[in-house]
Amino acid sequence: MNPILVIGYGNPLRGDDGVGWRVAEEAAAVLPDPPVTVLTVQLLTPELADPISRSDLLILIDAAAEGPPGEVRCFPIAADSAAAASLAIGTHEVTLDRLLGMAQELFGHCPPAYMVTIAGESFEVSESLTPVVEAAVPEAMKCIFALTDNA
C-alpha cells in the first residue's frame, strides 16, 4: 500500500483554528501507521516539502474562516496551481501552492493532494472548539476515510 500523509494545521490555542489538530489526532488514533503518517503543525513550513514528496497521497486539514460554522468541505488541490508555484518564498509565509511546488521542484514528486476544511465559528483565544465545530469532526473523518480507502 502507498504511504499516505495527513497534516492537520492551525493554532490549537485559537478556538476553532485548532480543528485541524483535533481531526488529525482523531485520524492518528484510528488509521493504521503505516501506511498513514499523521502530523500536526501550526504553520506550513518549507521542511514539510520533503515528507510530502515521499507520499503518494496528501490530506491537509484546516479550519475555514468562511462558510456556515461547522460546514465540512473536501476538495482536491489543483495540480496546476502547485506546478506553477514559485520557489521564491518569504521567511514567514509558505502558501499551500508554494509548498506543493517545492515538493515537486526540490524532490521531484508532488502527490495528489486534498484539503478537508471545517468552517469555524470562533477564533478567539481558547483551547476548546465550539460545539458546532466539534460536532462536525465525525463528518470530516468520513471524508478522510473515503480518501484513504480509495488510495
Image (cartoon, helix red, strand yellow):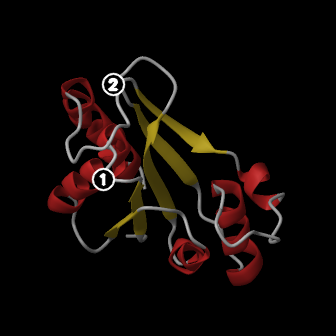
Above/below status of 18 relative to 131: below
Circle number at residue 3: none
**Marks 2 and 1: which is nearer the front?**
1
How many C-alpha atoms fall within 10 Å of the one at disc 2: few (<14), some, or many (≥20)? many
Above/below status of 52 relative to 132: below
Contact check, label 2 and label 1, Cβ < 8 Å: no
Q: Residue at x 41, y 60 (%)?
A: 7
Give how far across and how far down residue 149 sits, in percent.
34, 50
Task: Say left or right for 57 vs 87.
Answer: left
Q: Which residue is mark 1?
A: 12
Give how far across and how far down residue 33 sits, in percent.
24, 72
How many C-alpha atoms fall within 10 Å of the one at disc 1: few (<14), some, or many (≥20)? many
Above/below status of 78 relative to 111: above
Q: Residue at x 30, y 54 (%)?
A: 21
Out of 112 and 86, give the one closest to the viewer.
86
Q: Which residue is mark 2?
A: 70
Q: Earlier in the sequence, mark 2 or mark 1?
A: 1
The number of numbered badges drawn on the structure is: 2
Q: Mark 2 falls on what kind of element?
A: loop
Task: Say left or right for 28 vs 21.
Answer: left
Q: Mark 1 falls on what kind of element?
A: loop
Report which quarter residue 46 is drawn in: bottom right
Residue type (three-letter) at the residue carrying disc 2 = Gly
Above/below status of 142 relative to 55: above
Task: Say left or right for 108 vs 59.
Answer: right
Give how far across and how far down residue 80 sits, in percent.
79, 51
Q: CA distance from mark 2 to mark 1?
A: 17 Å
Report which quarter residue 85 is drawn in: bottom right
